[in-house]
Amino acid sequence: MKTEEYIEKAEGALLHTYNRYPVVLDRGEGVYLYDTNGKKYLDFAAGIAVFALGYHYKGLDEALKNQVDKLIHTSNLFYNVPALDAAAKLKEVTGLDRVFFTNSGTEAIEGAIKLARKYAWKKDHGHDHEIIAMNHSFHGRTMGALSVTGNEHYQEPFKPMIGGIKFAEFNNLDSVKALVNEKTCAIIMETLQGEGGIYQAEESFIKGVRQICDEHDILLILDEIQCGMGRTGTMFCFQQYGVMPDIMTVAKALGCGVPIGAFVCTEKAASLEPGDHGTTYGGNPMVCAAASKVLDIFKEDDILEHVKEVGAYLYEKLEEIKESSPIVTAHRGMGLMQGLEVSCAPSEVITKAMDRGLIIISAGSNVLRFVPPLVITKEHVDEMTAILKECLA
């Protein structure tokens, strides 16, 4: 079947909620993707920061296949060994106490919101508690996650949102302080904003928010769905600031392609009880076998040190591009989550790059986002840089 026929078939069957690029991807190998015509692409998007280990990383496929042959699903009415293993490993790398597995990042946010509200309700049995979120944030598409997403564009067709949400300015501590009152039960933010344009938290800001939470018995929720799992050079981005969240959300690279997320919390914040929350597929043996193996690989193959080295090299090369290209107006980010702000429509550059065999994506309205597999090498950075320079020329 030709590419055009695949696309026509898709457009006749799928709900049109994505403006997809006219490419039908067929397979992946290492850090490269191939379409149904056999064209090769260097992947600097990693399925939107999902495929941290690239495609067919040694050991991960085998772990999935072995589990498929044993048991795929049981429901949460029973224990299963892969979930117990994955939870123990996630506790170890986060430093937190309790894990709830979900199917996605947005579901992890939903659970985190419920956790915070139940924590506050247990104190006073009130139903008027408030959550402070950040402008230009992105936490997901379901109604709760959308309600704490600080972007009117995403919310407008679906209002009213859930109540009790207020928005502060990211990296503006005074704007947070102005919203705190006796009803505030949580403050939620991305440690490094992704969709909003690759903005990292300033150290004084995140530490100031943590102090506010401590002083007022407010829960700090950190969304590490995109910036976590080694992407910034530490297992989780918050670990670079010397702070601890009360609740943290993780997904994307946790399963490196299989649908799994989680919210993880301290013992203090573990307010949910039997009957409060649930999921049919969350934590099933297949996805947890993948997560467990991913966490093993990160440790055994020293993925974090590799990210630090290659991330620094990527930063250097993108700085060079910023200095040499008149349409690049800013460069920011950490590790292997970086962005170039451009004065043209990012889609123009993305399309040209795709024509030349490079996949990159955008963030916000004017940022080129670089979130490649964490296993890329300096040679891959050089290959990307050469193509990008042609596209920006």
Image: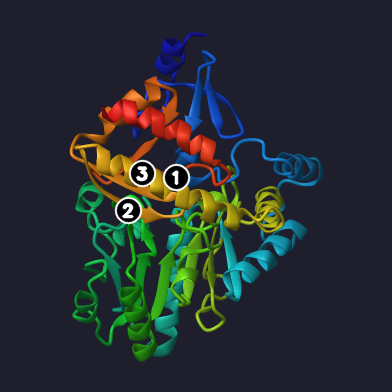
- Residue nearer the viewer, 354 or 316: 316
Residue that mark 2 sits on: 332
Identified by mark 3, the residue type is Leu
- What's the coloring here? rainbow
Q: For residue 169, what is the image quadrant? A: bottom left
Above or below 249: residue 352? above
**Sequence-first tag of 3 and 1:** 3
Above or below 72: residue 242? below
Q: Does dot 3 land on a helix, a strand or a loop?
A: helix
- Residue nearer the viewer, 305 or 7: 305
Image point (30%, 44%), residue name: 340
Residue that mark 3 sits on: 318
Residue 367 image offset from top left, x and y in percent: 28, 43
Q: Does dot 1 land on a helix, a strand or a loop?
A: loop
Residue 48 image offset from top left, x and y in percent: 45, 43
In the picture, measured across the screen, residue 138 lies left or right of residue 290, that is left
Residue that mark 1 sits on: 371
Q: Are marks 3 and 1 in contact (CB under 8 Å)?
A: no
Q: Nearer the viewer, mark 3 or mark 2?
A: 3
Callout 3: few (<14), some (14-19), or many (20+) C-alpha neighbours within 10 Å?
A: many
Callout 1: few (<14), some (14-19), or many (20+) C-alpha neighbours within 10 Å?
A: many
Callout 2: few (<14), some (14-19), or many (20+) C-alpha neighbours within 10 Å?
A: some
- Residue nearer the viewer, 56 or 276: 56
Residue 207: give its label.
none
Image point (30%, 60%), residue name: 147
Q: Does dot 2 land on a helix, a strand or a loop?
A: strand
Distance, label 1 to label 2, CA atoms, is 13 Å
Q: Nearer the viewer, mark 3 or mark 1?
A: 3
In the picture, measured across the screen, residue 355 lies left or right of residue 96, that is left
Distance, label 3 to label 1, CA atoms, is 13 Å
